[in-house]
Image (tube, rainbow, N blue to C red):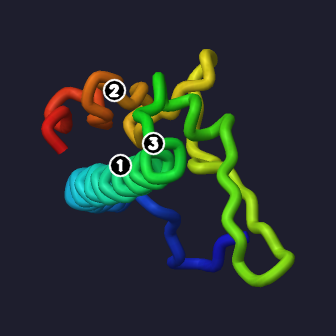
């Protein structure tokens, strides 16, 4: 119910609100996209570090380089931690996998692996040298 002399929003007021919302979206969206990209890059660095450490542990315990990255998730290691107690676990745990069971990077691409030298890398364009 309107009181005398009170008016609703006019078309100019609505347009001003729409322009302000557009400006906020124009400023905040690129910032959000940049932050999301940086977060994926940090996650890629961490994932590569984890896979490479798992690879080192595998080479130390098995005295050989694994045939592919799925081996790190399927095989287990065992270490005695104190007398009478043995700790066992997977070399690599809980990262995103594709349909074939290969680990994927934060950009949704399969990690690359060279079994001749044990090199692990991202196959995402621009991150191959990480």
Residue 24 lies in what quarter of the image?
Answer: bottom left
Measuring from the top left, give residue 128's x and y in whole percent.
18, 33
Q: Residue at x 69, y 46 (%)?
A: 76
Dot placed on the residue nearer the N-terminal end, 2 or 1: 1
Measuring from the top left, give residue 31's x and y in whole percent.
24, 59
In the image, 44 versus 118, the foreground residue is 118
Dot placed on the residue nearer the N-terminal end, 3 or 1: 1
* Crowding at mark 3 (Cα within 10 Å: few <14, some 14-19, many 20+): few
Of circles 3 and 1, the one toward us is 3
In the image, 66 versus 17, the foreground residue is 66
Asked if one can make out residue 11 in the rendered structure from this viewpoint, the answer is: no
In the picture, measured across the screen, residue 118 lies left or right of residue 75, that is left
Q: Secondary structure at mark 2?
A: strand
In the picture, measured across the screen, residue 20 lies left or right of residue 70, that is left
Q: Secondary structure at mark 3?
A: loop
Q: CA distance from mark 2 to mark 1?
A: 10 Å
Q: Residue at x 38, y 31 (%)?
A: 111
* Crowding at mark 2 (Cα within 10 Å: few <14, some 14-19, many 20+): some
Q: CA distance from mark 2 to mark 3?
A: 22 Å
In the image, 87 versus 43, the foreground residue is 87
Q: Which residue is mark 1?
A: 48
Q: Which residue is mark 3?
A: 63
* Crowding at mark 1 (Cα within 10 Å: few <14, some 14-19, many 20+): some
Q: Work out whether 35 lies above or below 101.
A: below
In the picture, measured across the screen, residue 53 lies left or right of residue 81, that is left
In the picture, measured across the screen, residue 50 lies left or right of residue 12, that is right
Q: Residue at x 43, y 45 (%)?
A: 59
Dot placed on the residue nearer the N-terminal end, 2 or 3: 3
Q: Which residue is mark 2?
A: 112
Measuring from the top left, give residue 118's x and y in whole percent.
32, 34
Q: CA distance from mark 3 to mark 1?
A: 21 Å
């Amino acid at each position: 119910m309107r009181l005398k002399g009170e008016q609703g929003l006019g078309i100019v007021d609505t347009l001003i609100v729409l322009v302000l919302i557009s400006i906020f979206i124009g400023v905040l969206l690129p910032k959000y996209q940049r932050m999301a990209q940086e977060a994926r890059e940090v996650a890629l660095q961490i994932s590569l570090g984890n896979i490479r450490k798992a690879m080192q542990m595998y080479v130390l315990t098995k005295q050989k380089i694994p045939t592919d990255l799925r081996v790190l998730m399927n095989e287990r290691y065992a270490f005695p931690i104190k007398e009478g107690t043995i700790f066992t676990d997977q070399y690599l745990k809980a990262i995103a996998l594709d349909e074939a069971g290969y680990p994927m990077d934060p950009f949704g691409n399969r990690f690359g692996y060279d079994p001749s030298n044990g090199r692990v890398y991202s196959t995402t364009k621009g991150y191959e040298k990480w």
